[in-house]
Image (tube, rainbow, N blue to C red):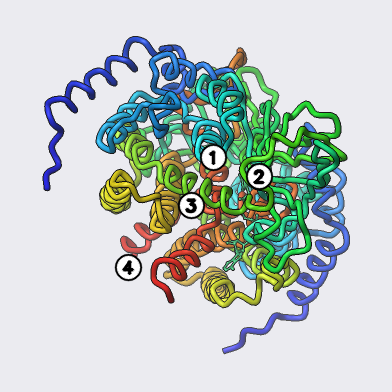
Amino acid sequence: MDFSLSDEQAMLKESVVQYIDKSYGFEQRMQVVASSAPYSAEKWAEFADLGWLSLPFSTDDDGFDGGAVELMLIMQELGRGLVIEPYLAAVVLAGGCIKRSGNVALRKLLLPAIMSGESVPALAYAERGSRYTLNHVGVTAVADGEDFVINGEKFVVLNGGTADQIVLSARTSGATTDDDGITLFCVCADVAGIERQGFVTVDGAHAANITFDNVRIGKADAVSEIGLGLGILEAAILDATLAVSAEAVGIMEALTTKTIEYTRNRQQFGVPLSSFQALQHRMVDMFMELEQSRSLLLRAAIMLDEDSPDAAAAVASLKYYVGTAGRKLGEEAVQLHGGMGVSNEVDIAHLFKRITVIDTLFGNSDYQLHRYIQSS
Amino acid sequence: MNVNFSPEELVFQDEVRAFFAEEYPQDILEGRRKSMLASRDIYIRGQQALHTKGWAGINWPVEYGGTGWSVTQKYIFFNEFAAADCPTIIPFGLGMVGPVIYTYGTEEQKEKFLPDILSSSVWWCQGYSEPGAGSDLASLKTRADLDGDEYVINGTKTWTTLAQHADWIFILARTNSDVARKQEGISFLLVKMDAPGITVTPIYTLDGDHEINQVFFDNVRIPADQLIGEEGKGWTYGKFLLTHERANIAGVALSKQRLRKLKKKLASYEQQGQAPADVESFRRKMAEVEIQLSALEYTELRTLASVSTGKAPGPESSILKIKGTEMQQAIDNLFFELSAYGALPNLRAQYEAGYDGDIVDDDGSSLTALRYFNFRKASIYGGSNEIQKNIIAKAVLRI
Ligand SMILES: Cc1cc2nc3c(=O)[nH]c(=O)nc-3n(C[C@H](O)[C@H](O)[C@H](O)COP(=O)(O)OP(=O)(O)OC[C@H]3O[C@@H](n4cnc5c(N)ncnc54)[C@H](O)[C@@H]3O)c2cc1C
């Protein structure tokens, strides 16, 4: 048994930690959130230079062959730094589907542009009414000669408003909730018939509802084999679920540290808040939940890297846990900050909002617990 | 003991129902049903409709224009009020400073202030908290120094709810620093918001709303007759008001109404095949909240019953504040969970008066996360829930 990081992993971690501490300030982040831009193009270019955008892609595709542990390391820090750039949407979700594609030409076309930061794609899978179920696909792709014609709507697509490429799940055969008959395609966001209703999400990021009105694409744009896309989608979402759980752990770490620091400095009744035992116990609980979450995170990452048959259950248990404990921890951090905790100018409020949104992404605690029970 | 309404009470219930169905401005209710956010104008029109009916001073004695209702009547009223989707009554005038003035004010003050409070023609806000004095309110630093027949006020109040709408503010300020206990030497003063030297700056809450403010006082002069009661006794009046605030904070009737709406939303999601995968677990959570609410409803009724026999709402009202806000927050959370991805878009603007853009969200889902975020305040304001527990430990349990 060995929980230590390899030299490469340790270097990766060190470089992300350094970057977040030195080059990713909360004030700067909030300027981006307040602007009309969804994220900072400058930061994105830096991520490309640092190699982060190449991390999860195979060396065959000129990537760095990073696995779940590497993804965990980077996402934890992006969480701690409350990074607003669409790493999850573009690299983990859309990139995660494309990298698993057997369509070599498509991979060779799209991945270099993602890794260089030039292309920032999105993955459109959720629909109004699908909740978290991946096989609920009502968007249709009907074969017409060499082409497919796509119709329907995708709901709350992260980074969907400005993505240049959209990977989407569409139904090429079967009924709305069949496992078979789902195909993944990749379309250029500016083709005729695509309409995007962009909005800001409650955590300050950007997303869009996207409608497809007789959008015509070629067979060459299929990311998966026709009718067999669910497996790729599930694998990408599993990675993404681990990724946001790691992000949540980074947020929990920041919330815990900042709350301890705040209660040490804030005086009421002539003493620091941290001197009240009632509050000390609450912070001890925060710390314990953080450590428990870290353990489940590490466990799930290792199992994913080992291709364990229990990896999906491990990820479900992780997501359940950070959903429940993480949200509670966020509420506690806000509560212990008093009025400061609910004011939009402090980082606590934004960390809390992000960890709340993370609970929803790819299925909240209830949903994950349900999956866990079903899988065991 | 019995829990049935008498024939007279049933008649009263019909009257209240008819009032909300016919006389009360229907556009306000329709707006609330479509989740529209209330503006200053909506709050005022709603309260003025109650006043026209003679129902503004719900807890006020008859001699000051109050309803003189029994505990049961108030219970009936609040249930119908919530069931009709009325916007909440802004508490600062009718629920807080009004009772302070009719209890401790001079005859002149009663004549000058009470009618405007009752008719909601004047908007009040509450200036207690300061940056350095939250839970430890008695450590407040805002000063009011007597200079001839005027007080000169210097300092700052913060987290002041809806001060941007207010015509008047009531504050606690230090009039004497040379005291043995810091609770002494504090006075209760009424200040007009347009007095020279007052500045109001917004503070945005985490949901992006402008609901609270910081209020600065820079050599603000007010006539000395805007002092309530005795100089230096403000802590007593302030505490009297705080127990009133706590009693009204439980919001059981509103929580019951929101739970009904939650059930409706679940039913419609089930119909559309959009229910949570583990719908039983969701139902279980709803049932748990419902049981807590039933208990809270009776706890509140028991408290009110003892008040009607002449006792002031005691420290027991802290239970109502803690449990009431916990239930509000639990319901907010269930709305958020049920809405799934629909909760993520921030479409607040779509629900504001005068919006004429695209309708992206058609069932209010996009307000659920914002509401959940915003209502984290409920366990912080009105004396935080931790402070309420300290009160119960000390004043009720004598630990
Ligand atoms: C949305 C909102 C609206 C408000 N509106 C108004 C208003 O209109 N007018 C007004 O005057 N005020 C208002 N307030 C202020 C509110 O009353 C204070 O925020 C509250 O009293 C807590 O004070 P604080 O924010 O300074 O937190 P602090 O007192 O610094 O407390 C921080 C944390 O420490 C805990 N704590 C403090 N002391 C103890 C202790 N002895 N034992 C255990 N735990 C303790 C608190 O419970 C809290 O969790 C509002 C607040 C909010 C959030």
Q: Viewer-nearest of labels 1 and 3?
A: 1
Between B369 and B239, which is closer to the camera in this rendering? B239
Q: Residue at coordinates 76% horizontally, 77% vertically from top-left?
A: A10
**What's the mark number on residue A376?**
4
Which residue extends farthest bottom? A1
Does label 4 or label 3 sit earlier along the sequence?
A: 3
Evaluate whether residue A315 shows in this view. no
Residue position for label 1: B100
Q: Label 1: chain?
A: B
Between B1 and A307, which is closer to the camera in this rendering? B1
Residue position for label 2: B188
Q: Viewer-nearest of labels 4 and 1?
A: 1
Between B255 and A176, which is closer to the camera in this rendering? B255
**What's the mark number on residue A234?**
3
Same chain for labels 2 and 3? Say yes or no.
no
Secondary element type, mark 3: helix
Same chain for labels 4 and 1? Say yes or no.
no
The CA distance from mark 1 to mark 3 is 62 Å
Q: Residue at coordinates 80% horizontally, 74% vertically from top-left?
A: A11
Secondary element type, mark 4: loop
**Which kind of residue does numbered mark 3 sit on?**
Glu
